[in-house]
Structures are given as C-alpha cells and as structure tokens.
Image (cartoon, rainbow, N blue to C red):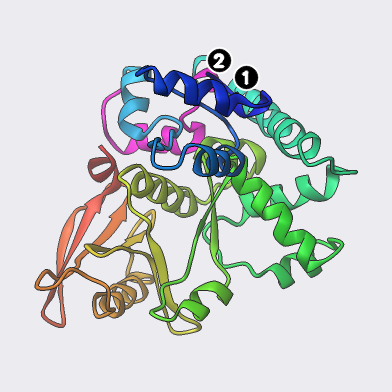
Amino acid sequence: LDEVQEVPEWQRLVRALLDKGRRVCLTGSNASLLGRELGSKLTGRHLSHEVYPFSYREFLEFTAQQPGAASLQEYLARGGFAAALSAGVEQGAVLLRELLRDVVQRDIVSRHALRASRPLMTLMLHLLAHTGQPLSLQSLAKGLALPSVAQTGRMIEYLQDAWLLLAVPRFSTKFKQRVVSPPKYYAIDTGLAAANTPNPTPDLGRRLENAVLLHLRRLGESPTFAAMPNDWECDFVTPTHAIQSCARLTPENRAREVRGLLQASALPGGIKGQPRELLVLTLDQEDELQEQGLNIRVVPAWKWLD
C-alpha cells in the first residue's frame, strides 16, 4: 500500500489484514506522519525500514561502472535517484531540481496548508548549500530573514519529515547539551544537493562527507559529530569508529584532521575493551599513520563505500 497515510482510516484495513495472518507492506514519503500513525494504531505489530536512494555500490551496478575515484566523483555529482541517472547528466539535473520543488509543494506546502513556499524553499536551498555545517535556528532565521525562530524550526522538521534532510547532532554525554547544540544538516542524496546548488567549483569534500553520512545511516548507525569550537572537530563518531572525510589529505589539513580523530578516540560511549577505529576517508589516498600511539587508516572512500 503506497502513500497509505493519505487514505482515511487505513489502519483499520491493515489491522484486519494482520488479524487474518496476512503480511502487509506500507510505503510512504512522510516519515513523521506514517511513523506516528503506525506507533499509535499498530503498536508492537510493525517493523520500520528506511529506504534511501542508491548507495555507491548500487550506483555502480546500475550504471555498469567499476569502483574507483572517477566513478565515485560521478556518484557524488549525480547521486542515486534511478530516474535521474537514466535521463543523462543534464536532464538528470533538471529532474532533480523538479523533484525538490515537487516534494516541497506536495509533501510540505499542501499537506501543512502553508501560505507561501518561498521561505521554505529559501531555507532548503541554503541548507543544501551548507551541508555539514552546524547551523542554529537563530542564525538561520536572522540570516535568511525568516519570520521567526519557531517557524524556522517547524520548517526544518517538515523538510526532515519529507526525507529531504538528515540531521546529525553534536556528541555530548549531557542530554541538554545534545538538544541545544546546533546540529549539522545533510541532503538525502548528493545529486539532489549538487543539482540545486550549482557551483562551478564544487566542494568535493562536502559532497564526500554527505555520502559518508548516508552510508553510515544505511548501516543502521546514528552517528554524531564531535567538536570543540575553534579548536578541533571530528565529522562522525559512532561507538566503533571516529571518521574524518576530506577530498585529499594534505600537509595543510593533516594536523586538523588528525587532531579531531585523536580527540574523538577518547570520548566515552565506545564499546568496552574495543577502541574506536580511526579513519580518514579521501577520494583516492591510502596510508597508515601513527599518532600518539594510535593507528589511523587513510582509506579511499570508494573502497570503504563499496
């Protein structure tokens, strides 16, 4: 049953089918609405699964390419929506721009009876152009001349519910700090971000970071980022890994990337007796570093994503 949440009293039908021993697959494009109704009407009788655009491996299979830096850069630029990949580079970008407008209008503006779509679209395009950067509601509302901080927060929730954005919170052992610290926002697809933020010199590092986050989410992880403002930052922290992503590890950025990993390695929340694996993911570099007695692996992202 596709987009089943649009049908009144759909839960009665699903419950009746389940009572008869039938299996039911429900699909929907609004995470909040579908999840809320599943939780209230079918408590304990459902399993949820998140479906993403193509992964890098699926992209390779779909386009009949081999893993490597070249195909990875194409994946970062074109993304994983099958229709856009089938349409070719230029037409695919057009489809991705239309997709964004359609989702905003259909799944957000119409569903929530918003009076205007321009503020919402402005916010979305800004977030796509600044993926991987901590952004507070106050700074967004002021910088984009949005009506209020509260409305900005609601619009971001709408964008997340419509599966356009993913938020990554800041690591903290204190609940209050996790809640109040500005999160980072990422696109649900690197191609969607690239098509809607045209740039003659694309930031491959940001796109790669976005792809890494999507891969972690596909693996069932809920990563955080760790940072000490104006001192150090680690892109992603999980119980088993601390990960930095950059297009290329250079003498200019090496100290910054390594410092973030070393600081993240000492954070609580890991698996007892198992230190976090420290990774630097790049487009095509491979190396092993020793810093302060810890091993840091530099891995081509196309190998890690595959």
Could you tell me how far apart the alpha carbons at marks 1 and 2 are, in whole angstroms?
6 Å
Residue at 68% x, 26% y is: 8
State the image coordinates of residue 207 (x, y, percent, origin top left).
48, 48
State the image coordinates of residue 160 (x, y, percent, origin top left).
60, 48
Is 135 magenta? The answer is no
Residue at 46% x, 31% y is: 53
State the image coordinates of residue 186 (x, y, percent, origin top left).
53, 52
Residue 121 seen anywhere in this rendered image of the structure: yes
**Please, what secondary structure does the residue beneath circle 1 have?**
helix
In the foreground, 205 or 38: 38
Above or below residue 98? Residue 229 is below
**Which disc is residue 91 wearing?**
1
Labelled pair 1, 2 in contact (Cβ < 8 Å): yes
Q: Magenta region: which residues? A: 65-84
Residue for badge 2:
87
In the rendered structure, the answer to whether residue 178 lies left or right of residue 264 reads right
Label 1 packing within 10 angstroms: few (<14), some (14-19), many (20+): some
Label the magenta part by its dominant secondary structure: helix
Residue 194 seen anywhere in this rendered image of the structure: no
